[in-house]
Image (spheres, rainbow, N blue to C red):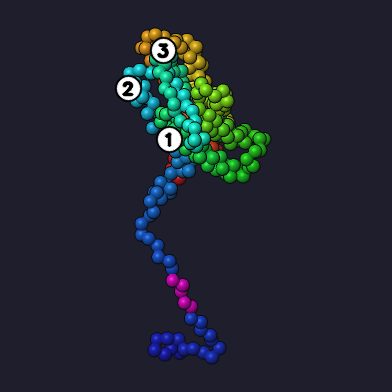
Amino acid sequence: METDGHPSRGDDEQYVTIEEEPTAWKPSYRPSGSFFQHLLTVNFVLAMGVFGAFVPWLVMWLHLLATAEGLWNVKVATARIDGWTKVSVPQKVRLLKDRSVLSISHLSGIRGTILNLNLRVVIALSEMITFVAILQDVSFRDAPLLRLESREDLVPFAFMLFVSGGFLVGHFELNTFDSLHFAMHHVGVVLQLFGVCSLGFVTDWSRTAVALIAGQFVFVFLWVGAVIAVPKRSSDERKVTRASKLCISLELVVFTFNVTAHALAIHGSGANQGNVWASIFK
């Protein structure tokens, strides 16, 4: 029996009123950055972070080499000021126009320039991104960080070599006043060069990995040969400038191979399971 279009309520029936909880208001727009967050893979974003930090630094050095009329050594002696804080400041500048600059670190180590600061910023950015890549890789494989039982376990270990080498290169400047800085800087360079073996471990030594890692070391030997062959001193300023530009140019090629291999290793690690050419889209 129905009354007024509603079913009759029997004595044995119980009715409970259900009140819906108010839902939170959601914006009709996406927050800034969500487009890339939902479109691109984390591996690709990390790899491009490393490469994107390197490219402006590379362009800066190429512009420096192209526009420099002279490129020779400069010594900046520092000393502490009596009655002031225990921080040394530049005291004396000595122009050595007859001596070549044999490396990027050599030129960056001249105190008072912005070159060393730029180097440290690029290294710091690359290290932070690499730490994220390490955590992502071990988290995906559900493996302890320091376990070295398989080829895949060597990937985060090689990443740590790259990070450690970058720290030593950035912290210990290459100058002619401190032997500890000189030694530790070169230790850092060696660690960073061998850190790109991560690409070999990621791809099980694919042709791409072998080509990039071999290319890096070929240009390392070319740079060492240039450092040995070019005149360290010359009364001709043009010869000194040519020698300096040659050595720095070869080292820039080394860095390009190094960073490219490292970025590809990051992209191929973790969820991409060794495929450095995996899709960049989710």
Residue 185 lies, in percent from the top left, at 54, 26
Measuring 39% from the left and 89% from the top, which residue is drawn there? 4
Q: Which residue is mark 1?
A: 53
SS majority, magenta: loop
The kind of residue tagged 3 is Asp
Toward which corner of the image does residue 95 lie, by quadrant?
A: top left
Instruction: Let me know if residue 227 is in the magenta part.
Output: no
- Judged by depth in the image, the label closer to the viewer, 2 or 1, is 2
Measuring 54% from the left and 40% from the top, which residue is drawn there? 131
Q: Is residue 195 left or right of residue 102?
A: right
The kind of residue tagged 1 is Ala
Number of numbered labels in the structure image: 3
Depth order, front residue of 247/88: 88
User: Is residue 93 at least partly visible in the picture?
Assistant: yes
Element assignment for label 3: loop
Element assignment for label 1: helix
Residue 205 lies, in percent from the top left, at 56, 27
Depth order, front residue of 49/4: 49
Element assignment for label 2: helix
Q: Which residue is mark 3?
A: 98
Residue 55 lies, in percent from the top left, at 40, 31
Which residue is most to the front? 83
User: Is residue 244 at least partly visible in the picture?
Assistant: no
